Image (spheres, grey):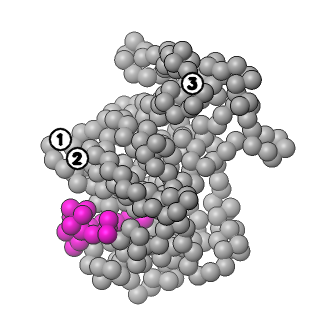
Amino acid sequence: MAATAAASLEPALAAPSHWDEFYAHAAKPDVAEYMLPYSRIASYLDPDFLGIAIEEARFLVVGCGISALGEELYDTFAGRMQEVMNVDISAYCVEHLRRRSLQRPRMRFAVEDMSHSSLPSSSYDIVVDKGVLDDLLAFTRFDASGAPSREVPTDAGERAACAMLWDIRRVLVEQGGVYLCAGVHGPERLDSLLRSSALGFGSVEHFDLGGGEVGHHLHVCRTQSGGSSSSAHEHEGGFERYVADVLHRKYTEVMPLLTPERAAAVRALFAPSGGGTCVQRPAGALYTEAFTREEQGE
């Protein structure tokens, strides 16, 4: 990858110290599960579904927290996989999990920020994300009083999500890699992120896991299963094009305020340059140019 995602990001949205404090003091239990237990997604981690021999598989669990997900995955297959790597931005969580898994020799642990990790490229067959993308998309810009700002919309959530997905795509093997994303968001929220040609997944499947009023969803994203290993993800300026693609869809397809006329106006703001690529522009600037101040407050 020629350009790193981190170079295009806003400042850190949540310091590691926040999560250290949260898990060390607020979350007292030894194991804390966010949203879905392992049993709800276990069938999608079956080697036959994933299309990989378990003895060859390298798993990566992102945003592991103090969940038992990695341990249950490991124990289900009696540790026969190559490794289960657990990463989190919180050093407290990583050390907590490490101490719990001293008897699991192929469990690995690292403190990593998955928006710009140091993990080697094309090194994992399966990446599992349970709720991390939800957290990133929930980021909100606040004003000086601490209240959510409605002056301009924030694109921080989309940018943070793009950065993590870009890095996940980087660490997945080019042939037959699988990213499993479990969370509360369905295709209407995640399609623009996961199906962008700039990100380069070969296929994306959605499974409705139910779950009552809120609802739970699983997206299974696969890298190519054959043919050339090159993808749009590797091209110069690819991350910038990916962000532009996601924000373009946000402002033209997702936001309900857009009439056809306003949608056309926003598309014009993303007009291709002479080189034929989308021009990345701050979402706040696009918003103020597309809407009146009264409409921005709705």
User: Is residue 33 at least partly visible in the picture?
Assistant: yes
Does 7 sit above or below residue 125? above
How many neighbours does mark 1 have within 10 angstroms: few (below 14), some (14-19), or many (20 or more)?
Answer: few
Residue depth check, mark 3 versus mark 2: number of the one nearer the observer: 3
**Label drawn at residue 207:** none
Q: Secondary structure at mark 2?
A: loop
Q: Amino acid at mark 3?
A: Leu
Which of the 4 image quarters holds residue 27?
bottom right
Question: Mark 2 or mark 3, which is nearer the start of the sequence?
Answer: 2
**Within the image, what quadrant is residue 265 found in?**
top right
Kindly report the distance in space between the C-alpha atoms of the residues bearing marks 3 and 2.
35 Å
Crowdedness near tag 3: few (<14), some (14–19) or many (≥20) residues, C-alpha within 10 Å: some
Per the image, the residue denoted by label 1 is: 228
Is residue 15 part of the magenta span, yes or no?
no
Q: Amino acid at mark 2?
A: Gln
Residue 215 image point, x, y percent: 50, 58
The residue depicted at 44 percent of the width and 68 percent of the height is: 86
Answer yes or no: is residue 123 visible.
no
User: Which numbered mark, 3 or 1, is in the foreground of this view?
Assistant: 3
Residue found 49% across the figure and 64% down from its top: 211
